Image (cartoon, helix red, strand yellow):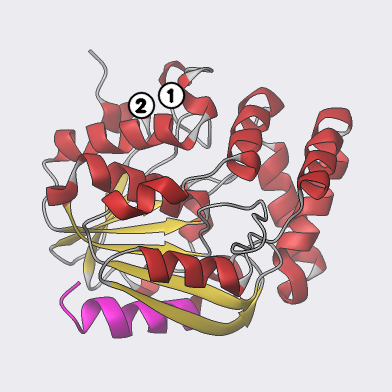
Amino acid sequence: MTSIRHLLNVNELGHGTTPLLLIHGLGCDQTVWRRLLPMLENDYRLILVDLAGFGYSAPQAYDAKRHGTPSGHADDIAALCDELNLEDAVMLGHSIGGTIGMLASIQRPKAFRRLAMVCSSARYLDDPPDYRGGYTREQLESLMQLMEQNYQDWAGTVSRVALGDAATESRQLNLQQRFLEVSPDVLRPLANSIFLGDTRHHLAHVTVPSLIVQAARDAMVPLEAAQYLQQHLSESELVVLDTGGHYPQLTAPDILAKALQARLVMQGG
């Protein structure tokens, strides 16, 4: 039987003893953390994964039905925790990667001592009058329609919007290319599940302390969505980075690293 470590292209590096499991977001792979890693490798045993269907994960890792939802990927992460015998690890997840790690922690609470969720959201769709996810249903359905009709235009639009005021031509092209390297058959169902889905009902079941890290100017996830996570996750802390864009690990790794070091390393996380 092929190990989940092989299926998810797990790579380990770093000089520390505390495991830090890094989970990338939609349309990316483990290389999205590259600029951040040198700032963490002295403090942690870094564990990098490619979610099924992304990066260099094994083709046989992907199941169209199971991996069309964040929960399917969370099952993989829970299995990886078992295989690696993880205990008291830190989970660092970006965007939907944070949600996937959070869902995995419900299944394997003893595997983690802390969750760090960067620019994550429990729901992208507005639910007035009490919840602001950042998008109306019409906006999200239009975005998904563009994805169906012209995948390249969708990748260009999303990469530009996601980077926001942190965008440069090279960064935008880099992110767009990351999206285009993923099969539309993989990305579309998962994107639909994420953008039109709702994971708020899971928050009450999370027992692992959480650090919510949010960019101050993120067009994909408004501050209100990050505040909602902080208010509904037990033992949680919200840190707002003075930076723009949805990908601080790409555009402001030094700022993100300082926030993580101050609240994870210094507190024994």
Horizontal arrangement in the rendering, residue 136 relative to residue 1 (left or right) = right
Cβ–Cβ under 8 Å for marks 2 and 1 = yes
Q: Secondary structure at mark 2?
A: helix
Q: Is disc 1 surrounded by few (<14), some (14 to 19) or many (20+) residues within 10 Å?
A: some
Q: Is residue 48 visible?
A: no
Horizontal arrangement in the rendering, residue 195 relative to residue 200 (left or right) = right
Q: Residue at x 19, y 42 (%)?
A: 108
How far separated are the C-alphas under marks 2 and 1? Answer: 5 Å
Number of numbered markers: 2
Residue 245 x/y as whole percent: 66, 70
Q: Which residues are magenta?
A: 254-269
Q: Main secondary structure of the magenta part?
A: helix
Extreme residue toward the front, this view:
129
Dot label at residue 194: none
Amino acid type of disc 2? Leu
Residue 68 x/y as whole percent: 54, 27
- Tell me where residue 264 sits by quadrant: bottom left
Q: Residue at x 32, y 31 (%)?
A: 75
Residue 210 x/y as whole percent: 31, 66
Q: Is disc 2 surrounded by few (<14), some (14 to 19) or many (20+) residues within 10 Å?
A: many
Residue named by callout 2: 7
Does the magenta-highlighted stretch encompass residue 187?
no
Q: Secondary structure at mark 1?
A: loop
Amino acid type of disc 1? Ala
Quadrant containing the C terminus is bottom left
Residue named by callout 1: 58
Does the magenta-highlighted stretch encompass residue 262?
yes
